[in-house]
Image (cartoon, rainbow, N blue to C red):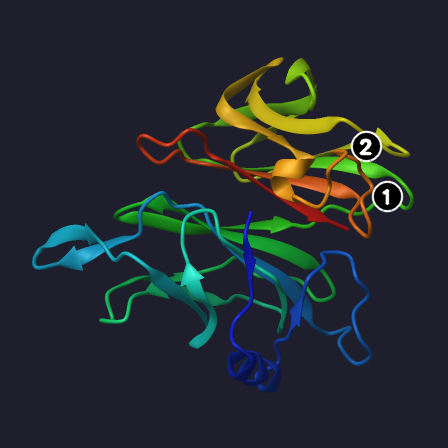
Amino acid sequence: MTLRTAAAVLTAMLATAGCGGSSSSSSAMPPGSSNMVRARFGDGAPELEAIINGVPQSIGQAYLQVDGQTVDTQFSYGSMTQFLFLTPGTHSLTALDDLGYRVGPLKSASLSTGKEYTLILVGSYPKYRVLAFEEPASIKGGAQLSLYEASPQVPKASFGRFTASGHSNFKQLGSAAFGNVATVALGSGVSDFGGYVGKGNQAFPGDALTLRQVSAFDKQNELPFHNATRLSLFFYDKVQGSSGSVFGSLDK
């Protein structure tokens, strides 16, 4: 998954408004931020559409605003921002193009002080919504696998591990219902590792990722890898004609 940050000037604007950027889901909050929330934002909607010339049409390349401030200038299917600081409570998300056509504003659930969230825009025209996933607690010194079930078309999905080198030995480790995140511990560390989303011990077509596919630097498919201890899998509605609907990130 590609992680994007807004331009420096926009980050400065967000900081002034009570928000800031960070690249990890489990880094300690800086002094004075204990009354804040950390959140990142993803696009899980296969197509962002608005009424253009009287009919629903794609708005194409969009940018994302949170509470009226731009946080991502390239907000598209599968993208994910870095973590930002927000005030507790509800927030407004709007995806829009340069001509002003937009999806939203969409209101998030209320976010609690001191917690961390992943907020994902899902659905299709005209039923878009924002899912709020509270970030899983990390296991010190261990590896984890998480599934964020953000596919309205699939009420429940299984997830698990497989051997990366042979793309074999698929084994279900858990499941998650739509709108929920599930996490399993993998022990002190794993290698030759990949994660998948599917049904039982079988991955949905194209929905299996090795660690190296998520980060090209992780050539041995090992976890923990540098500061990352968790493989996060984000399961979305599939784009017509695409090979898969799972995106990944390496998180603390």
Location of residue 26 (image quadrant): bottom right
Q: Which mark is residue 185?
A: 2
| Residue lying farthest to the left in this orientation | 54
Residue 139 visible, this angle: yes
| Residue at position x 75%, y 42% in the image | 230
| Helix, strand or loop status at disc 1 | loop
Residue 173 visible, this angle: no
Residue 225 lies, in percent from the top left, at: 80, 44
Which residue is at the front of the view, 120 or 194?
194
Which residue is at the front of the view, 131 or 22?
22
| Residue at position x 64%, y 18% in the image | 167
| Residue at position x 52%, y 71% in the image | 6
What's the amino acid at mark 2?
A: Ala
Q: CA distance from mark 2 to mark 1?
A: 8 Å
| Residue lying farthest to the bottom in this orientation | 16
Crowding at dot 2, Cα within 10 Å, few <14 / some 14-19 / many 20+, comes out as some
Left-right relation of 129 to 203: left
Residue 216 lies, in percent from the top left, at: 65, 43
Residue 144 lies, in percent from the top left, at: 78, 37
Residue 72 lies, in percent from the top left, at: 47, 67
| Residue at position x 79%, y 62% in the image | 27
Left-right relation of 222 to 94: right
Residue position marked by numbered label 1 in the rendering: 139
| Helix, strand or loop status at disc 2 | strand
Tag 2 near tag 1, CB within 8 Å? yes
Which residue is at the front of the view, 165 or 146?
165
Which residue is at the front of the view, 173 or 178?
173
